[in-house]
Structure formats: C-alpha cells, structure tokens
Amino acid sequence: MTVDQITYLTFGLVLSVALVLDLGLMSKKNASISMKKAMWQTVFWVGLSVAFCAFLWLEKTPLVATKYFTAYLMEWSLSIDNIFVFILIFTYFKVKEKDAGRALLVGILLAIVFRIIFIALGIELIDRFHWILYVFGFFLLYTGYHLFFKKDEAEFDPGDTKIYKFINRFFRVSSAEPHGKYFINQHGKFYFTSLAVVVLMLAAVDVAFALDSIPTVVSLVRENAKADFTSDDILVIYSSNIFAVLGLRSLFFLLKGAVDQFDFLQQGIAIVLIFIGVKMLIEFFGIHIDILISLAVIVACLTGSVLYSIRVKRQHATPEK
C-alpha cells in the first residue's frame, strides 16, 4: 500500500471507531449531557485530532502535520460562532435537554455530508478557475470587517430565516410535542416535528458558516494560489473540517453556560479572517506567507481575544457586599 492509501485508511478507521463510540457510548438516546461529561467528550475529540496530527507528522511530513493543525485550529475556532447560533436555535424551539444531544449529533452528521459535497465543488472550481481565490479573499475581508463590528449575536432570529420559511412552505410541520421523534404520523400523513426542523436548520447554518471556513482553510494549506491541489492538500482540508465539526456537539454543551464570557472572541476571529483575506490577495503579487506565521497569528488572535474577554469581565464584575 502507498503512504496515501495508508493515511486515508487510517483516517477512515479512526473516524468510524470514533463515531461508533460517540453514537453508542457517549450519546445515548434521551440522556442529558452534563458539563463534566461534555468536558471529557471535548477532550476526547481534541485528543483524537491531535493524535491524527502526530500520525501525519510521522507518516507524512512535519509540514503536512503543521498545515493540518493550523487548519483544524482555524476550523475549531470558527465553529465557536456556530455554537452561539446553535444555542439560539435550541432555545427558540424549546428543545428538551434529553433530546438535545441526539438532535445535535444527527444535525452535525448531516452537516458533514453537505460539507463533503461543498468542499468537492469548491476544489473543482478553484482548480478550474484559480482567480476565484482572490474573490474569496475580498469576501473574507468583508466578512471579517462585518464580524468585528457586529454587536450582538442575538440579532439572529431562527424563526425569520429563509431555511425555516422554506421548510414550513414545502413540508408539513407538526406543532405537537416531538417526544424525541423527528417524524410523526397524524391522520395518515407524515409530519416533520420541531426536532426535525432543528436538525435541518443546524445543517443549513453549518453550511452557511462553511462559506467562510472552507476558503480560509484552502488558503492555509496551498503553497501557491496558482498551483493545483495535491493529495496532501485535499487530505488536510477534509480531515480538519470533519474533525472540527464532529467536536461541535460536546463543545456546545461545554460552552452553552458560558456564551457571555467571551465577548471579544468574535473580534479575534474577525482579525484572523481579515489576515487570511489579505494573505490570499497578496499571493497575486507572488508574496506567500509561511504556514508557521499563519499558525502564530491564529494562536495569538484567539488567545489574546479570550484573555482580554476574561480581563474585561473581571474589571466589570460587581463586588460582593
């Protein structure tokens, strides 16, 4: 077997075993997920991702491993924005605690399928039209600027989204209590429950966020904007995306009680998006920023924004009397 075949086989096996563990042991039906359990699940997924990074370091090259870790860290940080929106969706539809874990898992698995399709289309477009990366560069600049000055995530209203209106227009949706079910039979007709609507909205929101994340990761892993994708590039793009998305569920339960603790995290993410946008655009002039510099910028921005958020919270905390 070739090195590429061994790598893809290992990735597939690790992913399959992890999903079996997640489905069978860590996300039992109708089971609530405590903060402690969510923390251990987050450690599990992050540890698995780091282990795969170490495997790439040994089996491939340190450069491929560094690209993977940088892309994964970028995807992981961008996924935090997803979580804030996910929390609003679950709150809006009044999803019960015992149904939340399984609904999140189904929505995330559906999102992975859509992401695989989306990535494949994106790679094909970029391979055919290299100039589209510069369009993505301007798009990331715009997105980063908009995110930096965005005041409140609560502006998002799940009931006013196009996907929610589309579902209600073309499908029968029941207002009855779902009791953990995604479809119910009423008077001989099948209806979507609110849980099914939640799952579809989770997948749609994740795909919308992929409009930012996939061009960002593509820029990080490619050595040259005009070069074709290598097998290593494609492996890094897919694996970093999938590992980051699979860790969303545990991260959701870990962060849902602390959504207001990192007020300036979105500013850190915004600066990273602007940096990547600039990185993509200056490659038109033959200027390439090394992957280690990109990694350093990502780590510095995310760490700095989290620490600054904590500092501001402490300064504005009301002293106990």
Image (spheres, rainbow, N blue to C red):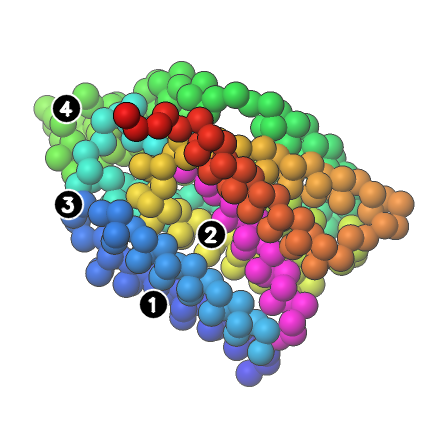
Give the Cα separation between the discs numbered 3 and 4. 18 Å
The residue that mark 1 highlights is 17
Q: Identify the image quadrant of residue 93.
A: top left
x and y percent of residue 232 in the render? 64, 65
Q: Start and end of the magenta stretch? A: 59-83
x and y percent of residue 60 in the render? 62, 75
**Amino acid type, callout 2:** Ala
**Front tag of 3 and 4:** 3
Badge 4 or badge 1: first in the primary sequence:
1
x and y percent of residue 87 in the render? 34, 32
Task: Identify the mark at residue 244; answer none if there is no mark.
Answer: 2
Give the Cα separation between the discs numbered 2 and 1. 16 Å
**Front tag of 2 and 1:** 2
Question: Between 127 and 250, which is closer to the camera in this rendering?
Answer: 250
Q: Is residue 231 above or below residue 165?
A: below
The residue that mark 3 highlights is 30
Q: Residue at 68% across / 68% down in the picture?
A: 63
The answer to whether residue 175 is magenta is: no
**Front tag of 4 and 1:** 1
SS at mark 2 in the image: helix
